[in-house]
Image (tube, grey):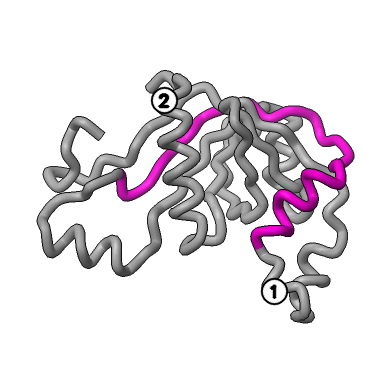
Amino acid sequence: MEITDDVWKKITSYYNEYSKKAFHCSFATASSEKEPNVTPIGSLVLRDNATGFFFDVFPTVMSRNIEDNGKVCLMLINGSTLFWFRSFRKGVFDKPSGIKMAGTVGEKREATPEEKEAFLGRYKRLKGFKGFKILWGDLDYVRDITFTDYYPIMTGAMTPKAL
């Protein structure tokens, strides 16, 4: 599905809601030999213009695949138990149960202080914990993503086609 300004507003709304429960997106990449790889990435930040960025810190296979083939597809599922319970009770999903987006990833570059804050600000309540510094103490490099396509996850007959 083409990403228009209206569609992007829906995508960012879904992403902001769903990422509060899921804490990560699944990023799918492929090597130049077409070997697939799926990696959880918890640092994706969306911008206002069908782009985003993520911190390229841990995923060695994904990073190598991006160097070979800059295409990526990501998926985020609404992990809210309440969302699923209400949907099953009503027999319909009011919104997609998840989103998929395809795009192209750019070169690794140094993160700006604003980019670091845009990500770390979401987790400021965890700042005093030991794991915060271990996982996110060295957020030095990001990659930009330009999204080209969006696919709402349609969950059978419970998902109205109009979503």
Q: Quadrant of residue 46?
A: top right
Asked if 77 appears above or below 79 in the picture, the reply is above
Q: Secondary structure at mark 2?
A: helix
Question: Which residue occupies 75% across, 55% down?
Answer: 58
Question: Which residue occupies 42% across, 19% down?
Answer: 2
Looking at the picture, how far across and down is residue 11, in whole percent?
A: 45, 37
How crowded is the residue under tag 1: few (<14 C-alpha within 10 Å), some, or many (20+)?
few
Q: Secondary structure at mark 1?
A: helix
Q: Is residue 60 magenta?
A: no
Asked if 93 appears above or below 132 in the picture, the reply is above
Looking at the picture, how far across and down is residue 4, in whole percent?
A: 45, 20
Amino acid type, mark 1:
Leu
**Observer able to see residue 32:** no
Q: Quadrant of residue 32?
A: top right
Left or right: 76, with 84 as reference point: right
Of marks 2 and 1, the one in the foreground: 2
Q: Is residue 116 magenta?
A: yes
Question: Which residue occupies 75% across, 39% down?
Answer: 64
What segment is highlighted magenta in the picture?
A: 96-122
Q: Find disc 1 in the rendering and name its residue.
A: 126
Residue 151: mark: none
- Answer with mark 2 or mark 1, whichever residue precedes in sequence: 2
Residue 6: mark: 2
How crowded is the residue under tag 2: few (<14 C-alpha within 10 Å), some, or many (20+)?
few
Asked if 23 appears above or below 142 in the picture, the reply is below
Looking at the picture, how far across and down is residue 141, in whole percent?
A: 84, 44
Q: Quadrant of residue 151?
A: top left
Looking at the picture, how far across and down is residue 161, in whole percent?
A: 18, 32
